[in-house]
Amino acid sequence: MFDMAALPPQLLEHVADRFRVLGDASRLRIIETLRTEGELNVGELVERLQMSQANVSKHLRLLAAAGIVVRRPQGTAAYYSVTDPSIAQLCDLVCDRLRSQNRDEAETFSMS
C-alpha cells in the first residue's frame, strides 16, 4: 500500500511532477496510442490523433524528459515508445476505477 507518510518531501515532489505530466488529456492520448499501437514516429501520431505536429512534438518532449517515453532516432525520423511499464498499470487502474464509478452512478440514477 502507498504510505505517503513514509515518503520524504523530495520524493513527494517527484510523485507530484509525474502526476502533472500525466495530467494532460493530449499526453494521455499519446501514451495510449503508443501503448496500443507500439512504436510510432511524430508524423504517425499526428495522423492518428489529429493534432498538430508542433503540439505532438511538445508533448513528446515532456514525456521523454519524464522518462515515460523513449525516443529512437532512425534516419531522418525519430520513433517513440512507452518505456515506463508502470504507466500501463496506472492507466488501467484509473480507467477501471472510473468505469466502475460510472456504472455505479448509472445504476443509482436508473433507480430514481
Image (cartoon, rainbow, N blue to C red):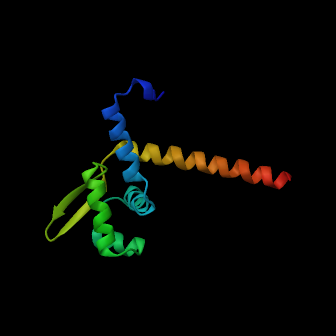
The furthest residue to the right: 112
Measuring 30% from the left and 74% from the top, which residue is drawn there?
A: 53
The furthest residue to the top: 6
The furthest residue to the front: 9
Query: Is residue 41 in view?
Result: no
Quadrant position of residue 62: bottom left
Measuring 36% from the left and 46% from the top, which residue is drawn there?
A: 18
For the image, the number of numbered tags is 0
Q: Give the image location of residue 49, x and y in percent.
A: 41, 71
Left or right, 109 with reference to 92? right
Q: Give the image location of residue 59, x and y in percent.
A: 32, 62
The furthest residue to the left: 75
Q: Give the image location of residue 65, x and y in percent.
A: 25, 52
Quadrant position of residue 15: top left
Q: Nearer the viewer, residue 37 or 92?
A: 92
Figure check: 30 above or below 68? below
Query: Is residue 3 in view?
Result: yes
Q: Nearer the viewer, residue 56 or 48?
A: 56
Measuring 45% from the left and 44% from the top, which residue is drawn there?
A: 90
Left or right, 11 with reference to 104? left
Left or right, 101 with reference to 79? right
Figure check: 61 above or below 3? below
Measuring 38% from the left and 74% from the top, which residue is drawn there?
A: 51
Quadrant position of residue 75: bottom left
Q: Give the image location of residue 28, x and y in percent.
A: 43, 58
